[in-house]
Amino acid sequence: MRDKRLRNVQYMMLFVNIVAVLFPASLICFTTQKVCSFFHARSFIGKLDALPVHPTVILLECIALTSCIVVSFVLREFVFTQRKYFVYLSLCFDFVISIYLMVLLNFNYNGILFWVFANIIYHVQDRVKLIFVLLAICIYVGTNQEFLMINYRLYSMNDYIDYYNASIQKYMLGGYNVLISFNIIIFIVFCIYVIQKQQNIIEQVNSLYKQLSEKNGELENANEELKQLADLKEKMGQTKERNRLAREIHDTLGHTLTGISAGVDACLTMIDRDPQATKKQLELISKVTRDGIGEVRCSVNELRPDALERLNLEEAVRNMIADMKAVSKAEVIFVCEPARLQCDEDEENTIYRIVQESLTNALRHGKADKIWVDIRKRDSVVHLRIRDNGCGCKEMKRGFGTTHMQERIHMLHGTIRFNGENGFVVEADIPVRWGKEEQV
């Protein structure tokens, strides 16, 4: 909202200019009527270089034009303040009206241009402002009446003031000159207010920019710390899980292998003298071996993503995608049909890990910025398709990731295909054994 003091200065300037325009028009009109009433026309006209044709019409037109300037000011400042095109249109309108008023008064007053200057300085942007101001200054210099009277015959307000006696002339000329000077002073004060206000705005913008830069720096540092913390947490989780799995396998294998070793030693000592007991011992060793293998499988099967422990498959994948989006600019489009698809744990683990590995490869190796993940179940088979718009690879080399995906799929008697000609595509078909669909 505009400063109240600046608004008051604007009101004063508008009022002074209206009075300064109407004064010469009124003086000429009323003096002409007085000359005619006292039959002094012959002597009065003899002193004039030029004479207005219709003084009354000039006064009425000046009243109408100054009213238009007031209306333009009200609409610009109070009604259409947010519409830039109307503001510029009203400024052009004021400029044209000012030129017409000066011509109408035979350039007895050209201070009305200061009103136009003031509004241009406040409303117009820098480059356009410069064009308007330069144009207005040229017109102001070129509309000086004394300069124009060298080549043109113009009627002068001073000739009409000379009709009155010396004491009245003193008050008229003094009052009018004070009015003109006051208009210039108000214009200067207005410019000072505008410059000061713009300077304050610049200082506020610079201060806000400095604060924003500091906050951005703090945010970058916080993001870096969070990233390091996330990496550390992931490594700790991996280490903890590896240690747990190592302990499980160590205990299981140690116990199983120790039993097998002892059983084999016993078989070696009695194979010659008691083959039947040796056979029973071998059967026992076989059972211990099978139990050990079963326990190792149980330990490995417990290596299950935490997300799948807490959420269903679809929600876990969505969470993984959301986490990936949070640290990258890639767009991931995910479709899962039917909703809340449920499978056995090993099937869910495989789907989850393949999606995870494919997203990682798309970002790390393919440099993709758009990835499509499609999981659909048709006729007891889950069709998994992950496609990206990355660089792909024409000659595909087997790595740990793709080999691990193939091993997981083959364990479930499924099939998997890779295609790197246009981006990179991973397609897998996984038969569902005991899973069921739970519709929301």
Image: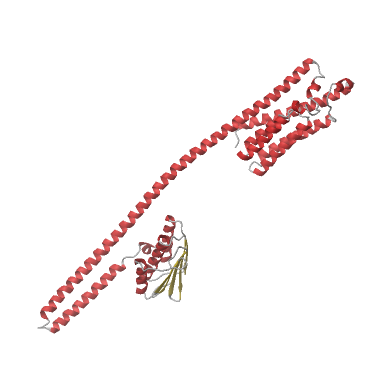
Q: Position of residue 272 (x, y in %)?
A: 10, 83
| The one of 361 and 295 positioned closer to us in this rendering | 361
Residue 437 visible in the picture: no
Residue 368 visible in the picture: yes
Query: Which residue sits at x=77%, y=15%?
Result: 167
> Residue 117 is drawn in which quadrant?
top right
| Count of number-bearing discs | 0
In the visual, does 196 lie left or right of 210?
right
Q: Position of residue 357 (x, y in %)?
A: 38, 64
Q: Position of residue 257 (x, y in %)?
A: 19, 71
Q: Is residue 224 depicted above or below 165 in this figure? A: below
Q: Is residue 105 depicted above or below 435 in this figure? A: above
| The one of 372 and 365 positioned closer to us in this rendering | 365
What colouring method underlies this structural image?
Answer: secondary structure
In the visual, does 153 lie left or right of 276?
right
Where's the N terminus, which quadrant?
top right
Q: Position of residue 56 (x, y in %)?
A: 83, 30
| Residue found farthest to the front | 151
Query: Which residue sits at x=70%, y=39%?
Result: 92
Query: Which residue sits at x=29%, y=69%?
Result: 298
